[in-house]
Image (cartoon, coloured by chain):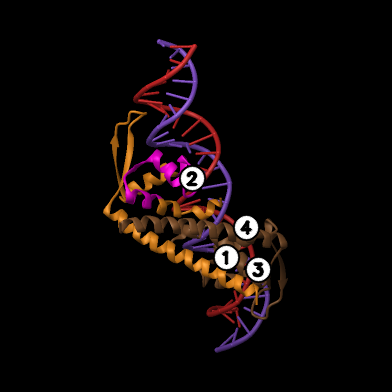
Chain colours: A orange, B brown, C red, D purple
Amino acid sequence: MNTQFKKGVLELIVLLVISKEDKYGYQLVSEVGRIVDVNEGTIYPLLKRLTNEKYCETYLEQSAEGPARKYYKITVAGRVYLDILKREWLEFSQTVNNFIKETSKDDKE
Amino acid sequence: MNTQFKKGVLELIVLLVISKEDKYGYQLVSEVGRIVDVNEGTIYPLLKRLTNEKYCETYLEQSAEGPARKYYKITVAGRVYLDILKREWLEFSQTVNNFIKETSKDDKE
DNA sequence: CACACTACTTGACAATGCAAGGTAGTGGTG
DNA sequence: CACCACTACCTTGCATTGTCAAGTAGTGTG
């Protein structure tokens, strides 16, 4: 997969996932991984950024299967930011797709 | 505009533009700029990368309005790469868009 | 000749993803 | 109990690519 395409989009995907339900980091790695390839070294720093910027909050919960899990919960500011990101992405991707279609259409003329 | 979304996509856009017609750098800045915000400091290094990787070739032509223009012409390898990039982008953007739709649909249920 | 405009180039910097490795808790096996 | 596997979290160093700002040069105009 093209690494560069992911830049910035992962933030959107992570926010989308936690906007549905609180998740812990390790879980996000596998859930986000179903959408796009990703690894721990990417997700944890991203979660720290989102937390620093108050787009999400964390709380710990014990687990019977290992160390305590740190859950991430989206904040109100996070939902606002998510809406902006979503809109920006949809507009951006559509602009690029339209341009691809335009140039491809010209091929046949 | 979200800077990060652009990563990697600019390469696709530039290749698309020169796949239609040879262009010189300064011209690409303005043509690509109609699709996404971009500035010279981004385009020229990108063109150098594409040239180093043999996805395009350059030739100089005199201009009556200033210094000689360096034109960029896509190569066969460039067209092959462009097709791959295009396919990857379409797949990637569709995957993300589908995920956005899925999560947004759930909101209403 | 100073200036504006065209055109190309470069260097320092910022953002973000990856690979690899480290720290810890829990439970099972010899 | 020693060891190992698995879960879970975190960090460091690096690569890629975009931005900003500045610089170099050629051409024509007042």
Of marks 4 and 1, which one's residue comes earlier in the chain? Answer: 1
SS assignment at label 1: helix
Chain letter, disc 4 residue: B
Is there any visible trace of residue A95 in the rendered image?
Answer: yes
Tell us which disc is closer to us: 4 or 1: 4
- Marks 3/1 same chain: yes
Query: Three-letter amino acid code at disc 4?
Result: Ile
**Chain that bears disc 3:** B
Q: What is the magenta segment's predominant secondary structure?
A: helix
Quickly name the residue at label 1.
Answer: B13
Using the rendered image of the protein, determine whether residue B38 is visible from the camera's viewpoint: no
Q: CA distance from mark 3 to mark 1?
A: 10 Å
Q: Secondary structure at mark 2?
A: loop
Residue labelled with disc 3: B19
Label 1 Cα neighbours within 10 Å, binned few <14 / some 14-19 / many ≥20: many
Q: Do residues under tags 3 and 1 come within 8 Å of each other at their CB atoms?
A: no
Could you give the CA–CA distance between mark 4 and mark 3, rounded to whole angstroms? 14 Å
Q: Amino acid at mark 3?
A: Ser
Which quadrant is the N terminus of chain B positioned in? bottom left
Q: Nearer the viewer, residue A51 or A101?
A: A101
Give the SS element for disc 3: helix
For the residues labelled 4 and 2, say whether their Cβ atoms are less than 8 Å apart.
no
Q: Nearer the viewer, mark 4 or mark 3?
A: 4
Dot 3 or dot 1: first in sequence order is: 1
Q: Is residue D14 left or right of residue A84?
A: right
- The residue closer to the viewer here, A72 or C13, is A72
Identify the magenta region.
A14-42
Q: Are marks 4 and 1 in contact (CB under 8 Å)?
A: no
Q: Which mark is residue A38?
A: 2
